[in-house]
Image (cartoon, helix red, strand yellow):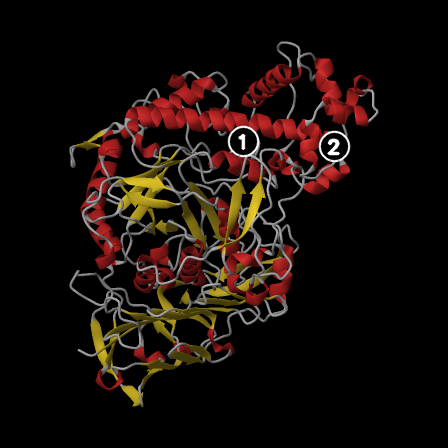
Amino acid sequence: MIAPNGASRPCSFCPALTLATLLVLAGTGADIAAAAESDWFVFEPVKDTFGPTVLDASQWVEAPTGKHGFVTAKGDRFVFQDGTPVRFLGGQIGSFGKEQIDYAVRRMRRQGINLTRLHGLESLNSRGGRTSFDYSPEGFDRLDYLIAKLGENGIYIILDVHYPLTYRFTPGDEIPGLPEGGPASHAQFFNDQIAALMHRRMADVFTHLNPHTQKRYCDDPTLAAVEVLNEDSLFWGTIAMPFRQELEQKFAAWLRAKYGAEAGLRRAWAVVAPPRGEGASALERGQDARDTQGRDALATAAVLQEGEGLAPGQRVGLLGNGLFNAKYFQANPDKAVRAQDQMRFCLELEDKYWADSVAAMRKAGVKVPISATNWQAHGFATRVHMLGQSRLDYIDRHGYWDHPQGEGNQKWRIATALFHNQPMVKAVQADQDTLIYLGRGNLVTEKAWEQVLGLPMTISEWNTCLPNQYSLEGTGLMAAYGLLQGWDGLLEFGYFSSDWREALGPGSFDMLANPPQILQFPAIAALWHRQDIREADVIAESLYDDRSVFGLDDDRKPVPIAAALIGKVGYRFVPEGRAPIVKDIRPYWDADRRIARSTTGELTWNASAGFVTIDTPRTRAVIGFLNTQAHELAGVTLRSRTNFGALYVTALDAEAPIESARRLLVTAVGPARNTDMEYETTSQKSSLGIPYSRLREVGKAPASLEAITGRLEIRSRQAARLRAWTLDVVGRRVREVPLAVQSNTVILDLSASARTVYYEITTE
């Protein structure tokens, strides 16, 4: 979503929330209550001097890269060549100068980040180049230096060379239909010349020799993984002329190879097929199914439109991707066989491009796991697209909560963004059994159901976006449930500033310009790298065989979508049908109150009250609406007056649990706002009929944070010896604060006057 030169690009999708979800939220009083001005304090960022502090999470980031060989995919895990397992945490990096890179990369390691990503790589091309193979020495120099510094600091990188939405071919590439050059999104799947050009460019990039490391990119173990394409699919969007004509002619040729003469096509497409998954097998039986319809297919000329046909040079049009939903085919059963042929045709084209791309990169020397893309389709065709994804080494996904809309989406500016301003923590429905694609539903549950069981899974772009007032919630929720689901990589979008910014924004996606997100990283890094939350067993699978995957029914899950908050879920593709894994979730799922408890006993998501608790021996946390009740975890109790925020208690002594640890970190993060920032609800409604919010005033620096206030009780065998200090944002002690002791429990008064998000509690 962002070019490596830092230039903003319009997002290629515009997620919104579901109507049902927002109607649930509308009656919850979800707006952030106006806190007393005294509960807010000015955010005071400071430069990191890289001295030893309790916030230094680099202990979980082994440096340099490559100590255990290259990253490989083994079953559903990433492991190094020597068998050492690895899980990745990080964010997509922006474009920095060399001095900025030196500082930013060191900071990333101290924040527990061990993976970053770049996509598109248009900056490697010379701006005045005649062809796509005229490269920029300056562009390669920036990437060379970045990769070298990442490697020194133990941070790996994912590269995908092409983003077809933004990549622009040159006139010198001599692509028919692009005499002046320009983009050709989707065309690589069916245009041989464009595919060959992109494969050559992949080889050029990965065989480039980095003078700082004396290694080609493909020979550098800092490269963790590769994606063929960023955000592209034949099952998504529309294709412009003249490439659409080329694709339709290829569709006609594909149909001619399948049915022979046009009469055979007319007979097949005249069948009125049941729009259900089990009906796909009947269609496959061919002539018997057609005969039972008792129809004279030859007389049904309507199956082909005027100008369509299978004669040489003719074309057959494709149904719009947005039509692939059960409702459409229930109303238009005469389109059923045509739609299934179209899905098979598109899957074959995608499969060929993925396979050819993998072959080109392997020939160039790429050794690490390769995924296809991170995109999806419209409607139920997503599962067909995902079948193709499952044939590569790992699965990657993208997703956002409350992605900005309107001009704010095109320019990524909070000043012009339209958004729904609702908390994801309340967005759980009791009876939802289908995914709402494109980030329109709960980000955690949506991404969980999009994984393919048996393969490694990364989410290389995600965010709960500014200017949503609840945007801090995603950091902890994605990490906690990512561990429950067994995800292998989690990269927030993105790390686009080399250090803190003085105000929120101006964009929606910069963690350094949304301090409550990045301030949670020390606690989240400990949680993630130690795997404090156990991976759950599979409790339900979305199972498809080679026939049912082409059914025309919506992708209904065998349990409510909320099951992703209870145990591991995902797609499973098998050659022949069998009964799916479906376990009884009723002991863990209170549908009336919308409360989901994980099978591990470590996570509880209370959507009615709007909070999640993490309860493990070394991490205990509450995320969401804090003042709804006293939050009583094992040995930790929080009573807070603050409306919304995240509080973590993290043990930092080797394997010691909180009860016996000699050093604890308390992270208490509330929402942020700019000086004079004002929100308002507009009269403009989204496509779902929900009023948008916007910023009446963006405000200015300095930004302020709402303090988490209240009483925190921690049971500890070290209680009598513990002392507490407030910390600045890089972990340096500011001042000692009193701890009360009652029996074996210490009591920390969380006060706005402390002006901090961090407390160090230690026996030292």
Q: Is residue 304 visible?
A: no
Q: Residue 331's quadrant in the figure?
A: top right
User: Amino acid type of disc 1?
Assistant: Leu
The location of residue 233, given as percent across then percent down, is 51, 34
User: Amino acid type of disc 2?
Assistant: Ala
| 496 lies left or right of 597 | left
The location of residue 302, given as percent across then percent down, is 78, 23
Q: Residues within 10 Å of mark 1 (few under 14, many from 20)?
A: many
Residue 234 is tagged as 1
Q: Residue 681's quadrant in the figure?
A: bottom right
Question: Which sits in the foreground, 597 or 287?
Answer: 287
Q: Residues within 10 Å of mark 2 (few under 14, many from 20)?
A: many
Quarter holding the N terminus is top left
The location of residue 154, given as percent across then percent down, is 22, 48
Question: Which sits in the foreground, 672 or 231?
Answer: 231
Which residue shows up at 47% across the image and 59% down it? 467
Element type where label 1 sits in the image:
loop
State which tag comes first along the sequence, 2 or 1: 1
Q: Is residue 101 above or below residue 500?
A: above
Residue 273 is tagged as 2
Which residue shows up at 39% across the image and 18% down it? 173
Which residue shows up at 22% across the image and 47% down it? 101
Real-space Cα separation, disc 2 to disc 1, in angstroms: 24 Å
